[in-house]
Image (spheres, rainbow, N blue to C red):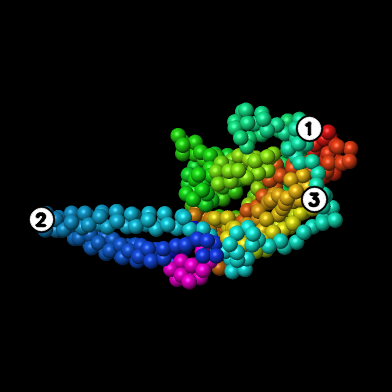
Amino acid sequence: MLDIRFIIENKQSVEKKLTSMGESLDFDLIEKLFQERKQLILKTEEISSIRNKASKEIGQSKGKPSKDLVQKMKSFGLELSKKSEKLKSTENKINDILLGIPNLPLDETLIGKSEEDNKVIDVFNQDKKRDKTIPHWDLGEKFKIIDMEKGAKLTGARWYVLSGKGAMLQRALVQWMLNEHVFTNEYTEIAPPFLVNRKTMTGSGNLPKFEDTLFSDYKNDLWLIPTGEVSINSLFYDEIIEQDLPLKYVTHTPCFRDEKSSAGRDTRGIKRVHQFEKVELYRFENPQNSLNAFDEMIKEVSNLCEALGFTYRIVELCSGDLGFQSAKTYDIEVWSPGCEEWLEVSSISTCTDFQARRTNTRFRDPLDSKIKFPHTLNGSGMAIPRIIIAILENYLNSEGVVEVPEVLKEYTKFDTIG
């Protein structure tokens, strides 16, 4: 959430950045509501002061207070009630507008209209890039490890069942990634709820804007998380963090996404599905270290791609392709020779203080002892289905067998699939 004062005091800059994202804002309405709230606050404080003074006079009166004084008290009380109600209504209108405004790109963020304007920063292991091979949906069926038909029978389109070595490979990937992030990168593992309340989903930025893309239990007003970021983001909701920053968390969760907006895209295989497993990285950082933390997270995920021997690339997202919460994002994509495309396996984002303001999460800065909003950063570390795709398609050998990457063998307890 953006600070309303910042919006008003930096109108031109805010408008320029929103325009670069394809967004707009009624600045006149924002300023009108801001001034209205300011006047209502002054008026309620004035009435409260007069009312308190009159109440004190009544208390100090030795005899029975006059009818005029009693009538004034009732009048003040009624007026205070009306102004307070009006103030609450105005604040709700302001809050509704602010909740719908996306985060602003950093000054250094690439400007562009869509994903077509994104920039490839670097490509790694280009010499290992494989030519066209059998796609994962055919391999999954051949080896009986990915069953789209069973998933459709159990639930519907874009659901799937992993079995045998497919399920074991998924479990091995999760365990390996968690161990890397916990023991090498020094993250604290969290096992959060997969259902969260409306307040938590709003705090992350998923509500109210993306309600149509989420699965929910309307009866209890609970929401299935689209990513582990949602749960961790609200760990310190309405609190002041008393621990030293950074706080680095990693979690493994299923992710649930309705993805109505992507209907018709990537319908074959497990590239884009309604439920998938993911290891998620999340940080609460001192704003001064935010960009350093961003670079560290890119390196941490890149190391996983290196360990798996993938051809991968880092892509900078332009302003028009940024997520709602993000101020700067780099995607990490691995080459899929069967699909013949680059698959995003991680998005590393810094959200500045956008999410912290929505959850009112604060910290005490050790440099000046002032209470401030931390910066939050998140990134997949990594998304499991697309890593399975990359392994099947990149490690298929000339004998028609998939070799398991060396780093996973101690977790899978098998060396090949086929």
Say whether residue 243 is visible: yes
Mark 3 surroundings within 10 Å by alpha-carbon count, few (fewer than 14), some (14 through 19), many (20 or more): many
Q: CA distance from mark 3 to mark 2?
A: 85 Å
The percent position of residue 109, horizontal first and vertical second, equals 62, 65
Q: Which mark is residue 142?
A: 1
Q: Is residue 139 magenta?
A: no
Residue 297 in view, yes or no = no
**Residue 333 horizontal/vertical position (percent):** 72, 53
**Which of pointers 3 and 2 indicates the residue nearer the eye?**
3
Q: Residue at x 82, y 52 (%)?
A: 129
Bounds of the magenta segment: 6-18
Separation of residues labelled 1 and 3 (CA atoms): 23 Å
- Badge 1 crowding class, 10 Å Cα cut-off, few under 14, some 14 to 19, many 20 or more, is few
Front-most of 257 and 271?
Answer: 271
Question: Which residue in the structure is indicated by mark 3?
Answer: 310
Amino acid type, mark 1:
Lys
Inspect the image, locate mark 3, and give the three-letter code of the amino acid beneath it. Phe
Q: Which mark is residue 67?
A: 2
Amino acid type of the residue that numbered disc 2 sits on in the rendered structure: Lys
**Alpha-carbon span between mark 1 and mark 2:** 92 Å
